[in-house]
Amino acid sequence: MNPTDKNAITESVSCPAVFIAATASGQGKTTITAALARLLRNQGKVVRVFKTGPDYLDPQVLAQASGQPVDQLDLWMAGETYCRRRLFEAARSADVILVEGAMGIFDGEPSSADLAARFGLPMLIVMDVKGMAQTAAALVSGIANFRDDVSVVGLLANACASARHRELIELALPKDVPLLAALPRDSSLALPERHLGLVQASEVQEDLELRFEAGAKALASEALAEALMRLPPVVFEAPFEDPFVELPSMAGITVGVARDPAFSFVYQANLDLLQQMGAELCYFSPIADSCLPECDALWLPGGYPELYASSLAGNRSMKAALLGFFAADKPILAECGGLLYCLETLTDYNDQTHEMLGLLPGEGAMRGRRGCQGMQTADLPEGPVRAHAHHRSISQGTPEPITHGRRQRHPAPGEPIYRARRLTASYLHLFFPNNPTAVARLFSPEPQLQTCDQSDSRSLSDAVE
């Protein structure tokens, strides 16, 4: 049965919601979304925020601003059923839902506009209007009329120079797309960044608090929250089929998860799924801890090991513990930054080379601003799992991979996937809910390496290819 069939809906709930999109990256979406979330939270509202696409850093910031967990929504990687379920669950307890888009509104396949249209979310357009006036109105008018399944409810003019600048934009806008707010260019509102995006929230919590409150104050003077709360509430429907009814069991399995400033690129949905399957989770720091917790499997997620390479290299007791775990043929999943940690050496941005674990032959090295990114499917022996890559490093001297990622829309091979004993390592970040069965097999203490085809996996992805 198609879970989106109108006859398959068993329950619905209404909740005010808005999709915060932009004409391009770098317009201030995350800054505005965080400020609006803090403003609504300060008004006593329960705010649930979602982030479009495979992003780790923005959700950290948005979770601190809203005081609530932040999930990623992606029609390809997660699937429509998963996204529908998450939105429905949030609407049952939230006073308002905010969804932050990715890139420009129509960029990507599927795009932010596709997600907003699929769930009937009205869109607020954020635009940096520096250096233009009436042209900003023309761009927004074009966006509002580009597709008939997208509803644009207004513009937020970011980096507005003056009252006259605001007036010129406002007078040129069509009547059905009002100027809902205009903010000046203000460095005290902007969020700190580094080479893969925003700085991790845990590193700058106090600074972020100041920026959230300043942003909330600026938006309060514009009465943006009141304008958005007056919009008709959105109806969120529960999918008829619950994809989590018959999950594979991980009862009795404890998964150790690396969690510190070097390893923090973790989907909350991945942790939730492991626990829903019955796994116990325990956390450890490869930077600070001297030994591993008692566990049956390990997950080394992505992050910024290049920034902490000296500390990682110097923690010899932890390195010995990980080498022993590997030698005992226990399952380890290493993703992106975790892969770099598993190589023999890592050269940081200062051209300093540090000794890593050496679980895999090879050397990792950071490179310039250009990097690799994109959606791919990891065709693991345990089953296919959808994933994405985003890195600015290279690895050399690595062994022959067991396979490569399968790109979303390109025939060229994707990221290499390596196997050594029970270690699975790749630049790919897996989205566990896409195929719980494959993930359970991956972390199982008993190797289950039979190849599974698409029909054998319990995949949650039902999005259009």
Image (spheres, rainbow, N blue to C red):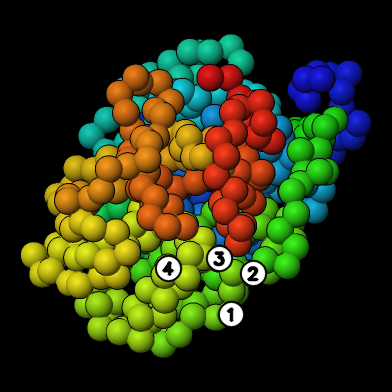
Q: Are marks 2 and 3 in contact (CB under 8 Å)?
A: yes
Please tell me which residue lies in front, 16 or 426. 426
Q: Are marks 4 and 1 in contact (CB under 8 Å)?
A: no
Q: Counting residues from the N terminus, which is met first, the one under dot 2 or under dot 3? A: 2
Dot 3 amino acid type: Ala
Q: Counting residues from the N terminus, which is met first, the one under dot 1 or under dot 2? A: 2
- Image position of 366 with respect to 104: above or below: below
Q: Which residue is mark 4?
A: 326
Q: Position of residue 189 (x, y in %)?
A: 38, 59
- Image position of 6 with respect to 300: above or below: above
- Image position of 10 with respect to 252: above or below: above
The residue at 58%/80% (across/down) is 294
Q: CA distance from mark 1 to mark 2?
A: 8 Å
- Image position of 316 with respect to 334: above or below: below
Q: Counting residues from the N terminus, which is met first, the one under dot 4 or under dot 1? A: 1
Q: CA distance from mark 2 to mark 3?
A: 7 Å
Q: Position of residue 104 (x, y in %)?
A: 40, 30
Q: Which residue is mark 1?
A: 294
Q: Which residue is mark 2?
A: 254
Q: Residues within 10 Å of mark 3 (few under 14, many from 20)?
A: many
Image quadrant in which the N terminus is located: top right
Q: CA distance from mark 1 to mark 3?
A: 9 Å
Q: Are marks 1 and 2 in contact (CB under 8 Å)?
A: yes
Q: Counting residues from the N terminus, which is met first, the one under dot 2 or under dot 4? A: 2
**Secondary structure type for disc 1:** loop
Dot 4 amino acid type: Phe
Disc number placed over residue 141 in the picture, else none: none
Q: Residues within 10 Å of mark 4 (few under 14, many from 20)?
A: some
Q: Which residue is mark 3?
A: 297
**Secondary structure type for disc 4:** helix
Dot 1 amino acid type: Glu
- Position of 151 compared to 397: left or right? right
